[in-house]
Image: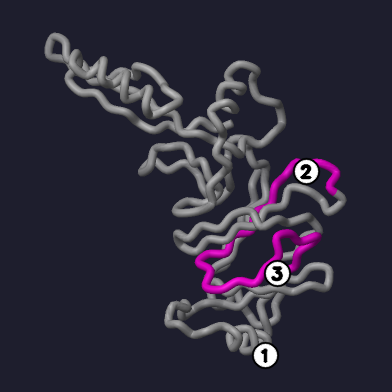
Amino acid sequence: MTSKVWLDRDEDFRPGVELFRSERLFALWSYSATYGQLLLRADQMPEGRGRLPTTIEVLFNPVDAVQIQAAYRGLVIRCATRDEATRICGDISDDGYRSENARVLVLESEGVTGHVITVNVGWCEGELSDVQPSFFNTFSPYDPMWPVKPLSGVGGELDIASPQKVADAFLTGLPEGVRRERHRYLHLLTALTEQDGRRRWHNLGVFLTEKDAEEAKRLVEPHVTMCGIELVPVVL
């Protein structure tokens, strides 16, 4: 079961009010230039005794300005007081890009403070599947490709696996209980054939390199109605 909270109304952001508190170890997990999305993730306690059964993710969206650490041992998020908001905004140049309804949120941890100027904030807690990049980037029927990064848009990519890592995964398998946080695009060769007035699409083969896929396409193309290469993400 997954619990979700999303705050986007003025009444959600009263000056000085505490929005979120957790004792977990949070890491700066991803930033996507598209929509200015900033993601923090926690699936461990500060003692680092292995992965917890549930994962907590906090998303700020869109972000106008930020001053944060790479990690927080326990985290409190609250709305800035009016004096804090005035001081923080006064230190940031007004270049005309700041959102009209942006809120100043203060991040506190072990006596250290930071801030995020954002319009919305939300968090999820639940069991994050080993092959799900994030609670905040799920499969979309309008873009039928499995997400391979925590946040949609530019940025936030997972590690790119090497061809050797892909080969090792096929030959020796993948370890149990380890998150699938690497991927590599493979090249899927498809072809359209016609027989007795009927058209059919075929998946002919998957190739590790574009060069091999193009060579295979050259050999197949003269014998089919249409032939193409699609990029398919393999998640490791």
Residue situated in front as seen by the camera: 216 or 68:
216
- Residue 141 shows up from this direction: yes
Q: Which residue is mark 1?
A: 83
In the rendered image, residue 190, in percent from the top left (x then y), is placed at: 31, 22
Q: Which residues are magenta?
A: 48-77
- Helix, strand, or loop for circle 2? loop
- Residue 5 shows up from this direction: no
Residue situated in front as seen by the camera: 165 or 95:
165
Indicate the quadrant containing the N terminus: top left, top right, bottom left or bottom right. Answer: top right
Residue situated in front as seen by the camera: 107 or 212:
212
Residue 171 in the figure: left or right of residue 52: left
- Quadrant of residue 158 within the rendered picture: top right
Q: Give the prevailing secondary structure in the magenta stretch.
A: strand
Residue 202 versus residue 58 in the image, above or below:
above
Residue 49 in the figure: left or right of residue 128: right
Residue 141 is tagged as none
In the rendered image, residue 49, in percent from the top left (x then y), is placed at: 85, 44
Please give the name of the residue rendered at 54% of the width and 51% of the height, measured from the top-left corner: 156
Indicate the quadrant containing the C terminus: top left, top right, bottom left or bottom right. Answer: top right
Q: Is residue 71 in the magenta section? A: yes
Residue 52 is tagged as 2
Q: Residues within 10 Å of mark 1 (few under 14, many from 20)?
A: few
* CA distance for labels 2 and 3: 21 Å
Residue 121 versus residue 222 in the image, above or below:
below
* CA distance for labels 2 and 1: 38 Å
Please give the name of the residue rendered at 47% of the width and 37% of the height, measured from the top-left corner: 146
Q: Amino acid at mark 3?
A: Ile
Q: Amino acid at mark 2?
A: Leu
Q: Amino acid at mark 1?
A: Asp
- Helix, strand, or loop for circle 1? helix
Q: Which residue is mark 3?
A: 77
